Image: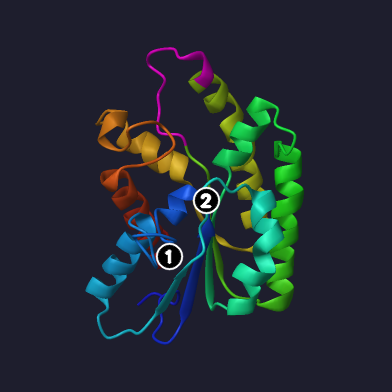
Amino acid sequence: MSDWLQDGTTFLFIGDSITDCGRRDVEAPLGNGYVRTFTELVTARWPERRIEWINKGIGGNKVSDLHGRWRDDVLLHRPDRLSVKIGINDLHSSLGGAPDAVPPERFEVLYDEVLGLTRRELGCPVVLISPFYISLNEGGDPFQAQVLDLLPRYIEVVERMSEKYGTRLLRLQDVFQEQLRYRGAGTFCPEPVHPNHAGHTVIAQALLETLES
């Protein structure tokens, strides 16, 4: 029995478009991605448990956006469990040199602040999901090469935050790299950032395994 998935708990997910997946539109309230698949896996395995699921993902978000809405979208809900998946938009903003870019150093500062606030005000168990990029760049695409070169710095931030705050950690880049040993990237995504149903299923299953370990 997983201590994470107890009867009567509230489990909140927050993140970017990969978490959102239409949850604010036709796929309300959980979206049609890994969040919904994860909840379905849990329900199938433990039908007797009543768990409240909340999805607060918003497409295009960076950790700076999460920082700005943390009180309204996380703290006010008083979740018993929290999952955070963020980073790929921060990386892209850094590569693009946007005015609101979030380079790895700022990514770490803002991530640290929201997790510190969560510890002080909620003290609930947290799982961090590292950013990923579903590509081996076998075609030598220059942009994909840039992303893959910079991605480890964002992943390292998430790993440091997990160690600092004693969270569970899902290393999704490693999960997908293992999958890509056997199948092409097109099995899991139409492009490297946004998974298809198969890709979201991989995430949901990996998250369940992380929380059961």
Is residue 148 or residue 74 the one in the foreground? 74
Q: CA distance from mark 1 to mark 2?
A: 21 Å
Q: Is residue 165 magenta?
A: no
Q: Which residue is mark 2?
A: 16
Say whether residue 165 is visible: no
- SS assignment at label 1: helix
Tell me the residue at 46%/82% (across/down): 9
The residue at the far front in this view is 25
Give whichever of discs 1 and 2 has the lower sequence position: 2
Colouring convention used in this rendered image of the protein: rainbow
Q: Is residue 139 magenta?
A: yes
Q: Which residue is mark 1?
A: 211
Q: Amino acid at mark 1?
A: Leu
Counting from the top left corner in percent of width and height, residue 108 is at 72, 47
Q: Main secondary structure of the magenta part?
A: loop
Tell me the residue at 33%/49% (across/down): 200
**Where are the magenta residues, as a range?**
133-143
Q: Quadrant of the N terminus?
A: bottom left
Is residue 54 or residue 157 the one in the foreground? 54
Quadrant in which residue 48 is drawn: bottom left
Counting from the top left corner in percent of width and height, residue 129 is at 51, 52
Quadrant in which residue 98 is drawn: top right
Quadrant in which residue 115 is drawn: bottom right
Residue 180 relative to residue 211: left or right: left
Counting from the top left corner in percent of width and height, residue 112 is at 73, 56
* For residue 204, above or below residue 196: below
